[in-house]
Amino acid sequence: MTVEKIMSDSESYDDFPARLRVLAVDDNPICLKLLETLLRKCQYHVTTTSQARMALKMLRENKDRFDLVISDVHMPDMDGFKLLELVGLEMDLPVIMLSANGDPKLVMKGITHGACDYLVKPVRIEELRNIWQHVIRKKRTEPKNQNGSADQGNDNQSSGEGNGSQADRNGKCNRKRKDEEDFSEDNENENEDPAASKKPRVVWSIQLHRKFVVAVNQLGIEKAVPKRILDLMNVEGLTRENVASHLQKYRLYLKRISSVASQQANMVAALGVKDSHFMRTAPFEGLGDFRTLSGQGRFASAALSHYTTGGMFGRLNTPNVNLRNLSPSTLIQPDHGQNITNSISSLGKVHPALASTNQSQSLFQGIPSSLELDQLQQSKCGTGMTSFNAIDNSRLRSRFSDPGAAINSSSNIFNSSTNMMLHGSYQQTMSGGGFGNQSSQNMASLNLDTFNVGVNSSSSLLDSGTIQSSTTQPASLLSTEPFHSQPPMRTTGNSGFSNDPYLQKNPIDISSSTMSLPLEDSREMQYQQGLVGDVQNISHIPSQRWGEQGQSYGHGSTATFGSLNAHVPVSGVVSPLSHSLDQDSGIVNEKMGVFMNGRFAGGASTLMLQNGNEKLASESRAMANDSFLLEQQKIQTVFAPRSYDPLDAMMNAMIKREQDETIANYDFGFDDYSFESGM
Amino acid sequence: MERQAAYLRNALFDQGYLDEQFLQLEDLQDEANPHFVEEVVKLFYTDSVRLIQSIELTLKNTPWDFEKLDNIMHQFKGSSSSIGAKKVKKECSQFQEYCNVGNVEGCIREFQEVKQEHAALKRKLENYFQLAREAR
């Protein structure tokens, strides 16, 4: 009878709210008893405890035992906010805070710590009747997150990663791509769909991306619509949505590249032409690498996934080498994880191909895994840096990529930058190494698709980061920290991306690494990695970084770099780098150097930068993709500290160098980035 | 009897001893919880006695630990507001304010007020419950 009465009283509640399982925590016995009675009156299942530790214990014993936690703020054994955080992290349950103190500051604190709601004592029953909404809300966002991963790749992943909040953010980031509005919707829809049925993720292989780019170019980037692209590509099993999301990324990549290019005005103009070419070519390679990268590291992916940006980056990378440049930096800058995504998007849609989150993830994985991990961990700041770097790098890169320097180069650059970034950025979101990581990651991912080429190199760089160390000097810059170094850079800037050099480096690193793909993937990668890491270290070196990269230039460039950046005994560093890279990586070396410079503590970075610069010069001449990247890098790196003007000068210098043909190889693209960041 | 009980209850409200929170308590009392209000009030007095003792102990040690005093009083305030003890709650807030500025004299004075109000309410509620019980 009583129950009936209660039931009738409560205006026909659904089943759900009625059996909500609540855990109430409050050290005040009166309040606890009152709360218990109130909750019972709402027909919830209540468990009470006056100790926060006991509450945690109960929650840990059985995570499914409760739907919601209500906790007092002032408790003797544990601060209510701390409990709130722990519950959110470990069990991911909605938590409502309760306090006799209704001070807005405290309420704000509750919210920032993740509370779903904040009630002021004495609590009224009306307030408690609605708490079930928090549970529903949380449950709703989670499944979406998990399902998000379908074609959306990054989008999904980002959403999948975080809980609702992250997903939302990611979703928003994705949505920010203005051009992609329609696609965003697709993505959104896709997000919803997966909830129902998980779609298999599409891996954008180089071949696939190549086809994609061909189709897009055929239709004209403005007119390229998923449906038509799909028709042109004529690939079995590919859905319009896959293409749509890939196109989105690609567009972002393009945008990013172009924005980067514009920064570098001169450089870009020259190189810009190449973009399209680059993009096309890059995808092929990038994709390849990308995949490779993905295989490599899970770490990266993890890291990447974490950072949407990373994904973005990755995505960006592939589409165009340019992206690489762009992405890394762009990525980095954005908020750390989120920003990166934005940056990536800005970089260009280029990545769309990469977009498939897989790629980015994979990129990251591959790349970050080795180096980035370190870097990633290094600092969250890195992320900041990374982003910073990323942006710089991207700039650097974009410059390079524009020319479309042999896709390789661009992709490399991109890759390398990504790698670098990834390396660096991975840390947290690319925080310290962040830049490197991020970029590297992104690069990896991005490059993979289009850039795969680059990516490969970058990834190799990343992986080879260690190898680089073998190169010794630069490696030291690069290798020593290969990815750590990245963070170091950041560390300086930890808080913020103050470590420009890092940024600069990173992107470059990655790019260089990626660039090196064509060269000698492994080596380049190394550099890149090293660069990346170094870049971080180099922090101040943005220009220095180049020096290192210029390794391939090594000899020639070193000198150049030396003058350029002087920071780092770069020449020394660079040379080593260049040595390894020399062969192909010449460019890469530079890049690496560049990156490294950033990372390496400056000294190396300078070298790198120089190298990069040199390379850039040479590259610019070549205008090949590679050079483009390098040049950009170089220019950037060289100028790094300064700002883009020097880069132009560098470009010129590089061009001259090219004639010398020492540098030629650089894909540097990376370098530029690194420099830029440094700048 | 019933009228007396009702009268007493109204007086408590009118005189500001109790506020609407007490009504909430009464609302929660039903067949499932027939003596809910009384139980909660009893709980309050047991707990508050403990708190008062704790404060007195803290006041004995010099220099005063204002933070601790504030914490205890915060608890006290929370409890009294939960049962609707309006005047007690007010004195608690006042005490906390003196604590925050380190006003020793103010704290001592205020603490006396808290104890007085606390005791006064206790008496009145006890009377009321008695009447209410007899009226049933």
Image (cartoon, grey):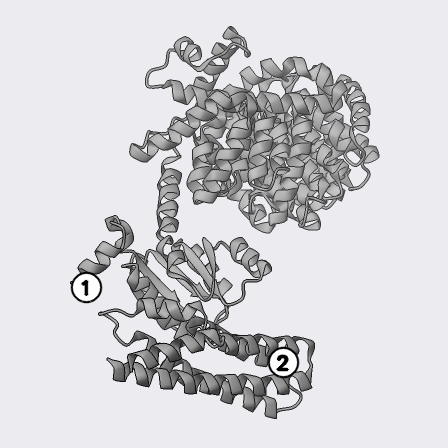
Mark number displayed over residue B66: 2
Residue furthest top as drawn = A218
Can you identify the residue that label 1 sits on? A2
Identified at 18% across, 58% down, the residue is: A4
Decide: few, some or many residues near mark 1? Use Cα within 10 Å; few <14, some 14-19, many ≥20. Answer: few
Residue kind at label 2, given as amino acid type? Phe
Residue sitting at the far right: A563
- Element class at badge 2: helix
Whether residue A472 is visible, yes or no, is no
In this rendered view, identify the residue nearer to me: A380 or A534.
Answer: A380
The residue mark sitting in front, 2 or 1, is 1
Residue name at image x 81 percent, y 27 percent: A645
Marked residue chain, label 2: B
Residue A315 placement (x, y as % from top left): 52, 28
Quarter of image, res B69:
bottom right
Looking at the image, can residue A70 be seen? yes
Crowding at mark 2 (Cα within 10 Å: few <14, some 14-19, many 20+): many
Measure the C-alpha gap from mark 2 to mark 1: 48 Å
Residue B29 higher or lower than A413, as above or below: below
Determine which of the numbered discs, if any, sits on residue A209 in the image. Answer: none
